[in-house]
Structure formats: structure tokens, C-alpha cells
Image: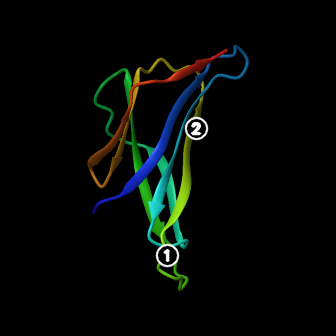
């Protein structure tokens, strides 16, 4: 399945009291009844690269088949020292982020 995505960003907030990692982007889905989310993959291959899985789940409502852009976000609290993020969908790599914004 081909999926369209755009506007991927990754940020590590390194403030002493409130550390977190946030990854966000936009996914184009076939109708507004589809929920899109990013989850940490159970498969983590490289120690300094985070692998996230994009999940798309349709609800049971009847909706028009009109493409919609949906924002997706993954956020994890704590200290993080990653240098890249790999986004996968159905086992395939769909995007790699190698520029991570670090804020203090």
C-alpha cells in the first residue's frame, strides 16, 4: 500500500525538569473516518535510532471517500539521545528523520 506523508519533525526537549522526545508529521488518509497514530515499534534495531510504526485504523462509520490530511504525533517523556527516527508502515520504511531539533 502506498501512503503519502509530509512535514516530518523530531524534537528533543532537554530542559532539566521536563525532558521529552516528540515526533510529528502529516499523513494523507482516504477518508476522515480513519485514525492515524505513531507508536513505538517492538522492533528496535539500532541503539541510537528510534523506530516508530504508523498505524491506521478505520472506524465503523460510513464516510465519504475523500482524502484528508491527519496530523500524527509520538511523544515520550524522559532523557533521549537518538540521532535518527525511522517511520514504518506495514513493515516498510516510509520516512527517515536525521535532523533532530534539540531545545533547552
Camera-nearest residue between 68 and 78: 68
Q: Position of residue 104 (x, y in %)?
A: 67, 14
Instruction: Classify residue 38 as left or right of residue 98.
Output: right
Instruction: Classify residue 60 as left or right of residue 20.
Output: left
Camera-nearest residue between 69 and 20: 69
Establish if 101 lies above or below 44.
above
Q: Position of residue 72 (x, y in %)?
A: 54, 50
Quadrant position of residue 12: top right
Q: Name the residue: 44% across, 71% down.
A: 30
Camera-nearest residue between 41 and 101: 101
Q: Closer to us: mark 2 or mark 1? A: 1
Q: Which mark is first along the chain, 1 or 2?
A: 1
Q: Residue furthest right?
A: 17
Q: Name the residue: 53% across, 86% down.
A: 62
User: What whole-number distance in Å separates the C-alpha atoms at marks 2 and 1?
Assistant: 29 Å
The residue tagged 2 is 75
Establish if 46 lies above or below 61.
above
Which quadrant holds the N terminus? bottom left
Disc on res. 16: none
Amino acid at each position: 500500500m502506498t501512503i503519502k506523508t509530509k512535514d516530518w519533525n523530531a524534537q528533543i526537549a532537554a530542559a532539566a525538569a521536563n525532558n521529552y522526545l516528540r515526533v510529528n508529521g502529516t499523513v494523507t488518509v482516504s477518508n476522515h473516518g480513519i485514525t492515524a497514530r505513531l507508536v513505538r515499534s517492538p522492533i528496535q534495531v539500532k541503539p541510537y535510532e528510534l523506530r516508530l510504526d504508523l498505524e491506521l485504523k478505520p472506524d465503523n462509520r460510513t464516510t465519504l471517500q475523500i482524502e484528508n490530511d491527519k496530523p500524527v504525533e509520538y511523544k515520550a517523556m524522559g532523557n533521549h539521545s537518538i540521532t535518527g527516527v525511522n517511520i514504518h508502515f506495514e513493515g516498510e520504511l516510509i520516512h527517515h528523520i536525521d535532523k533532530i531539533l534539540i531545545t533547552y
